[in-house]
Amino acid sequence: MSDAPIISIRALSKIYHVGDVDVQALRGVDLEVARGEFLSIVGPSGSGKSTLFHVLGGLTPATSGAVVIGGKDLAAMTDIERTVMRRSTVGFVFQKYNLLPTLTARDNINIARHIAQNPAETDGKFQEVLNLLGIAHRLDHKPRSLSGGEQQRVAIARAIVNHPAILLADEPTGNLDSDNSAAVLGLLRDLNERTGQTVLMITHNPEAAAYGHRIVQMRDGRIVS
Amino acid sequence: MINKLVVENLKHRPVRTLLSVVAIGMEVTMMLTLVGMSRGMVEEAARRARGVGADIWVRPPGSSVIGFSSAPMPEKLLAFFSKQPHVVLATGTVTQPLRGIESVTGIDLGPFTSLSGGFRYVAGGPFQGPDDLIIDDRYAEQNKLQPGSSVMIWTRKWRVCGIVEAGKLARLMVPLKVLQDLTSNTGKLTQIFLKVDNPKNTDAVIASLKKEMPDYQIYSIEEFTSLFTVANVPMLKEFIGVVVGVSVIVGFLVVFLSMYTAVLERTREIGILKSLGATPGYVLGLLVRETALLALAGSVFGILLSYVTCWLVFKLTPLTQHIVPDWWPIAGGIAVGGALLGTLYPGWKAVRQDALEALSYE
């Protein structure tokens, strides 16, 4: 683990406008994440953890404050710049897997490389990751033919295929049974340990959070511990 | 990769894809059929005109090349033409509109046989009586007629006396005098055909006749048949333009609805692509390629379908439809253009979609 922070967040706030009502989802968040760290962010519903996930992933802009990932300040970026940033800097793993239903597992992974304008061929290291994820023999199947656990593993493979600076996982085990949950969490930890991949995992499950090196608690849009 | 995604998207929703292709295909077929029928109609008329064997055609003043004017020329003009230098034969016909584009033509069989070399009878023979009718083989086949069959024209029953090979003058022919009397055109003709002693003298005869009869339309056969074009048929060009315009609107609406539905259905997928870093251009490119593929497939289907309409027109109507390969790229281009136009708004909507909202779309 390197000491230099790969994520640096200062006084981050985010206000959503819902009709005539302003909802303050983040209220001055300060956070640093070291390169190669596996950080778990926990908190109840409405605590702001998903909003933090979306801001970090460049899916929505911050209202104020600074978010620096790998030396790039997201606050200074336009929509297009944040979109391009997502290709190589951030990998997402969602609770609902979010695989493209029309493509096979292999093509779901390949399209991430295509969008990032990387060649379709992956390196040997990635083949090892596929073996580690246990999906190498399921790559020619479409999502509907895969179990939830398999789909989530494909989603993890897609998230890291472009070697992003950070892997953001939003409730990655939320739709899985306990066996598959344990398997996916174990894989995230293995990936972190073997490849040094920085992982930020959002969860409301304390057992899942325990897989991380560090746990951050959020409540009412703030980090409380 | 993007092409693979396009193809897989289309395969994933086969009914929508099929309906879009069929609808675009119908648009293309509509254009090709209309243009093909227009050309078929004028070229068929030109072929029948050439089959007459005349060197010179005389038409009444102010008449159109393809028209169903009755008989404004006096029959006594035949005697005048016969006396002209180099003219060896003059005969005329009366044409009376029947229904739709059908007409019946009255001919003086003797002189007409001398002019044209005679009909080639498939069955039966020449007129035997005043109620006799000669038809061409296509009319006979379409109406399941044979020598001896009866045909009602206006309120009169005619007997089919002969069936001739198509391509000479007209499709339904009756004795000239009978038709003249029946239509109150006694002593009048619709058009007059002249045969000259040597085709080399045709131009000289025409020049001489034009001096004598400046208001009449006097053509050599080459000149006359060259006038058989879509542009020379009153309002046909405008009609084609209207149908092409309607086709574009239909294609636009079909693709608009199809792609609008596709964008709504795929909101979440668009969100996924955006989360992976797909730019607005990438998402728009995806939809444009999908539309272009649908339009191309529809165009190919439409071209193939035009062969079917060609066969149906030949079998079921008195018209002729030509296959018009020179219009394939035009109709295809119009279909693709209309389809791409129909993708603009759905594409814009997809591009503008917020990635977060799209990802939470159920």
Image: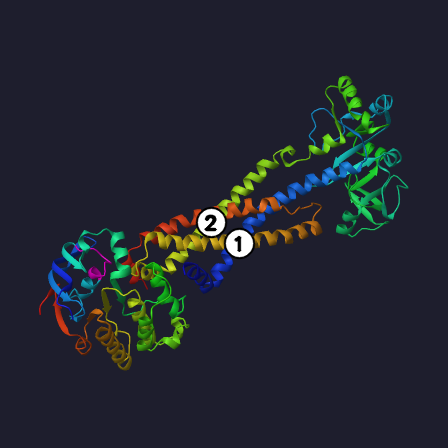
| Residue sitting farthest toward the bottom | A179
Asked whether the residues under the numbered discs 2 and 1 touch, taking CB atoms below 8 Å apart as contact, a structural biologist would say yes
Q: In this view, does B29 lie above or below A40?
A: above
Q: Position of residue B23 (x, y in %)?
A: 52, 53
What type of secondary structure mainly makes up the magenta span?
A: loop
**Furthest residue to the left?**
A225
- Quadrant (top left, top right, bottom left, bottom right) of the C terminus of chain B: bottom left
Residue position marked by numbered label 2 in the rendering = B339
Question: Few, some or many C-alpha atoms within 10 Å of disc 2 (few <14, some 14-19, many ≥20)?
Answer: many
Most foreground residue, A185 or A95: A185
Q: Residue at x 91, y 42 (%)?
A: B128
Instruction: Say left or right for B230 vs B9.
Output: right
Colouring used for the render = rainbow
Residue B242 seen by the camera: yes
Q: Which of B266 and A88 is in front in this view?
A: A88
Q: Where is residue B266 in the image (x, y as percent from the top left)?
A: 37, 60
The residue depicted at 83 percent of the width and 39 percent of the height is: B174
Tell me where residue A195 appears, x and y as whole percent. Answer: 24, 72
State yes or no: residue A15 in magenta: no
Amino acid type, residue under disc 1 in the picture: Gly
Q: Give the range drawn in magenta.
A: A54-62
Compared across the picture, whether A110 is left or right of A55 comes to right
**What residue is disc 1 on?**
B298
